[in-house]
Structure formats: C-alpha cells, structure tokens
C-alpha cells in the first residue's frame, strides 16, 4: 500500500508522462483492452465447453457407460473452474520489494 506522499508523487509522474508523450500512455490502454477482450473470448469458449461436456456426460449416463460419464463431468467441472478463474481480477503484488 502506498502512503499519501507516494500516491501524490505517482500522480505527478503520471501527469508528466501523459503531458510529454500521450501516445506512449495510450499504448498501455490499448494493451489493457486487448487483454480484457482475450479474457472475454476465453471465458466464452469455456462456457461452451461446459455445455458440451455436460451434454456428453448426460449422454454417457443414459447410455449406461459410467467411465466416460465421469470423464466428461470432470471436464465440465474443469471448464467451469476456468471460467471462474478468468473472471477474477488479476492479482497485483502488494509486497514491498
């Protein structure tokens, strides 16, 4: 956690950098948007995978084949976990170096 003095210094540095080279600062905004878009696409992919694996597990149960049913159910669970993981905010290191 930054102290008030450090936060003020950081804001001053950010303002100076923005005044000196706005295109350089915008490059970081574009990168952040690209990362967010990629996470959204990955999340949608895993949602489709959850549906497919769940349907496959149900079909295997109906067919009376428990081994593949467990396998597909595990894949559905893994995909659901990935969705949850992708939707969490990125971790930031809060320890002082």
Image (cartoon, grey):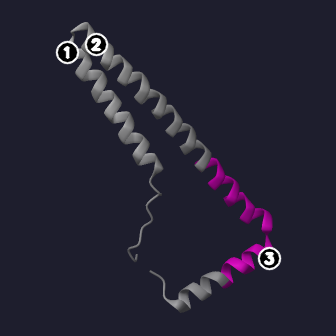
Q: Which residues are magenta?
A: 12-35
Q: Secondary structure at mark 1?
A: helix
Residue 85's place in the image compared with 10, above or below, is above
| Quarter residue 54 falls in | top left
Pick whichever of labels 2 and 1 is earlier in the sequence. 2
For image coordinates 79% across by 68% down, the residue present is 22
Is residue 35 toward the left or the right of residue 67 in the image? Answer: right
Magenta-drawn stretch, dominant element (helix, strand or loop): helix
Does the residue at mark 2 contact the one at mark 3 (Cβ under 8 Å)? no
Determine whether the residue tagged by mark 2 lies in a helix, strand or loop.
helix
Q: Residue furthest front?
A: 62
Query: Mark 1 and mark 2 in contact (Cβ < 8 Å)?
Result: yes
Q: Which mark is residue 19?
A: 3
Q: Would you call the spot at circle 1 few (<14 residues within 10 Å), some (14-19), or many (20 or more)? A: few
Q: Which residue position holds label 2?
A: 60
Badge 3 crowding class, 10 Å Cα cut-off, few under 14, some 14 to 19, many 20 or more, is few
- Quarter of the image for the N terminus: give it: bottom left
Residue at 55% x, 92% y: name it. Answer: 5
Q: In which quadrant of the rendered view does residue 39 lie?
A: top right
């Amino acid at each position: 956690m930054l102290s008030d003095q450090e936060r003020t210094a950081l804001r001053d540095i950010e303002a100076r950098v923005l005044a000196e080279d706005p295109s350089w600062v915008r490059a970081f905004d574009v990168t952040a948007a690209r990362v967010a878009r990629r996470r959204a696409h990955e999340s949608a992919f895993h949602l489709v995978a959850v549906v497919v694996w769940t349907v496959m597990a149900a079909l295997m149960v109906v067919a009376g084949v428990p081994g593949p049913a467990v396998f597909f159910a595990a894949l559905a669970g893994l995909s659901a976990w990935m969705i949850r993981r992708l939707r969490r905010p990125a971790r930031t290191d809060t320890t002082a170096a």
